[in-house]
Image (cartoon, rainbow, N blue to C red):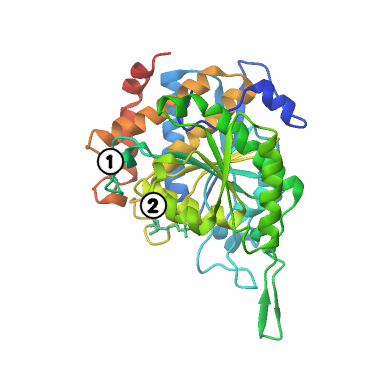
Amino acid sequence: MAIWSVRWSVKQYINFGKNVKIKSTTQILDIAVLPGDGIGPEVMGAALELLNAVHDVCGGPELRCTTYDAGAQFYVKSGVALPEATLAACERSQAMLFGAMGWPDIRNSDGTEIMPQLELRMMFHLYAGVRPIRWFPGLPQVLSDERARGIDFVLIREQTEGLFYARGRGVVENDSVAYDTMQITRAGTARVSEFAFRLAERRKERRKAAELASLVTCVDKANVFTSMAFFRKVFDEVAARHPEIASDHSLVDAMAFSMIKKPWVLDVMVMENMYGDILSDMGAGLIGGLGMAPSGDIGDEHGLFQPVHGTAPDIAGQGKANPCAMFLSAAMMLDWLADRYGELQLEVGARVIGKAVEIALSSGEAVPMEYGGNAGTAELTAAVTGALAEARRRIGS
Ligand code: ATP
């Protein structure tokens, strides 16, 4: 099982989802590739090269990766950030692989940035933003405490409501007062909480191996906001249906403290959209930087996989981006497809990518510029691709 797995069994998935498209094996899986802006196309090019090499090493079904237009630069050329043809291709595809989108100078009329990723989350109901944060040999040890080598938690960000519900709905009255309204629904909170408990169930064995109990933590601000007290109430109702998994609560400010003070005890955390946006960048900081943090945006019918980082305008076009977050996001995609379509070789491919990243980074020969080394996108891609065969050998079949 992939170390930071977001997997659940196909059977569970069928029970859970509506209109689930399960195909037979020996199939071609269509992947809609959206490289986007800034470093998005750079890390995406690297990931496609890696996926090709993984197929050579691990076999399995063909992934037919087709690139589509979308993003801020495309908006400048065409007046549309997310064209209909791209949306239709995403709808048809078995998964979406996404680089990064947005650009500081390219704005909507209200001053907000062009961010098609937010539209995609809403349109395809990608309600669970799954963000694993795991330390492994080769990553810088940001915290001096030795126990920080055991950092291994998953942050789940609700992605279809919360404070981001306000996007496009905010008001400024008489140029003197502005409002953005948070939305928390029972259905939205319940489904993301259920997802968190299922994921904790899947992580039980690795928690046991680390001599830790499984734990789902509700991160909120229930002491101040009515919406957050409601979020906690619905979470508690879901927790009551999962007595085999321990649960607790943390105020978001206290969680920011815990993530620095003792992150090695954390397991699965679930929270509203904005808190997840902030804490996932902090989580990336614990393992060396945004170039190491992958994510999967999961819904009942679709999955989109993208690094946590944005377009990084400060380093775009210079070949300096660390592609590992994109690699690990591609691995999450393989893992998800493996469960969904019953293609076990894809699960092997996911594990091989994770191991190859670990081998490449721990060899010390390719140290990302992000944390002080000389290796840019090309060098890291060569190092990880070059480690695939050894990773496959270590993992077995
Ligand atoms: P967004 O708001 O679009 O999510 P962000 O505010 O998280 O973006 P990023 O674009 O991710 O900002 O960049 C934040 C910082 O992290 C920048 O200094 C950037 O250069 C660095 N960074 C982000 N991704 C990478 C990467 N893959 N490799 C190296 N550095 C990166």
In x, y percent, where is residue 217?
56, 44
User: Does any atom of ligand 1 lie closer than 8 Å to the CB of label 1?
Assistant: no
Nearer the observer, 239 or 98: 239
Task: Name which of mark 2 and mark 1 comes first in the sequence.
Answer: 1
Mark linked to residue 146: 1
Nearer the observer, 126 or 74: 126
Q: Amino acid at mark 1?
A: Glu
Above or below, 161 relative to 109: above
In the image: residue 133, left or right of residue 91: left
Mark linked to residue 397: none
Q: How many marks?
A: 2
In the image: residue 156, left or right of residue 259: right
Q: Residue at x 32, y 40 (%)?
A: 147
Q: Residue at x 51, y 29 (%)?
A: 203
* Quadrant showing the C terminus: top left
The quadrant of the rendered image in which ligand 1 is seen is: bottom left
Above or below, 338 relative to 196: above
Q: Amino acid at mark 2?
A: Ile
In x, y percent, where is residue 395?
38, 18
Above or below, 229 relative to 362: below
Provide the residue designation for mark 2.
260
In x, y percent, where is residue 141?
29, 45
In x, y percent, where is residue 123?
71, 48
Q: Residue at x 61, y 19 (%)?
A: 342
Mark 2 and 1 residues: CB-CB less than 8 Å, in contact?
Answer: no
Quarter where residue 14 is shown: top right
Q: CA distance from mark 2 to mark 1?
A: 13 Å
Q: Secondary structure at mark 2?
A: helix
Q: Secondary structure at mark 1?
A: helix
Can residue 160 be seen here? The reply is no
